Image: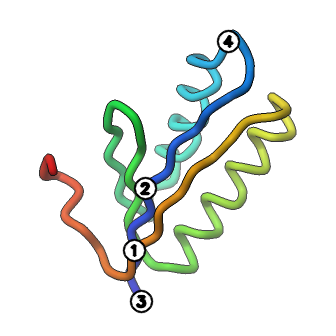
Amino acid sequence: MKTTIEISNYPLTKDYESQIIDFIARIKAHTNIKISVKATCTLITGEYETVFEIVKKEIKSSFEQYGKMIFVMKVLLGELDITKDF
């Protein structure tokens, strides 16, 4: 089953930009999903279990490395064409 996740990361520190960039870089390191970075969110598509395992792992890593931050996610059944601007 395919899924699409839209995720936004809001670190609760002054050095928020580098923390967001690090999270995106770690997500991009996974080659078994598709990723599109937008101005205020990152779109991730792929197999449901794979996408959620990656997101779970990288959110945990961010919490462990940087402390408090907020993640906002929207989850859709199916694979959106994330190459298009909406």
Q: Is there a contact, CB below 8 Å, between mark 3 and mark 4?
A: no
Give the spatial CA distance, label 1 vs label 4: 31 Å
Does dot 4 land on a helix, a strand or a loop? loop
User: Is 21 situated above or below 79?
Assistant: above
Q: Position of residue 77 (x, y in %)?
A: 38, 81
Q: Nearer the viewer, residue 28 or 23?
A: 23
Of badges 3 and 4, nearer the viewer stands 4
Residue that appears at 53% across and 57% down: 73
Q: Position of residue 59 (x, y in %)?
A: 70, 49
Task: Check residue 6 in the rendering and tell me which mark sits there, or answer none.
Answer: 2
Residue type, numbered disc 2? Glu
The residue identified by callout 4 is 15
Residue linked to disc 3: 1
- For residue 39, what is the image quadrant? top left
Earlier in the chain: of badge 3 and badge 4, it is 3
Closer to the observer: label 3 or label 2?
2
Q: Amino acid at mark 1?
A: Leu
**Mark 3 residue element:** loop
Instruction: Verify CB contact (< 8 Å) between mark 2 and mark 1.
Output: yes
* Number of other residues with Cα within 10 Å of mark 4, as a class: few under 14, some 14 to 19, many 20 or more: few
| Residue 13 coordinates in the image, percent (x, y) | 74, 17
How far apart are the alpha carbons under marks 3 and 1?
A: 11 Å
Which residue type does callout 4 highlight? Asp
Q: CA distance from mark 3 to mark 4?
A: 37 Å
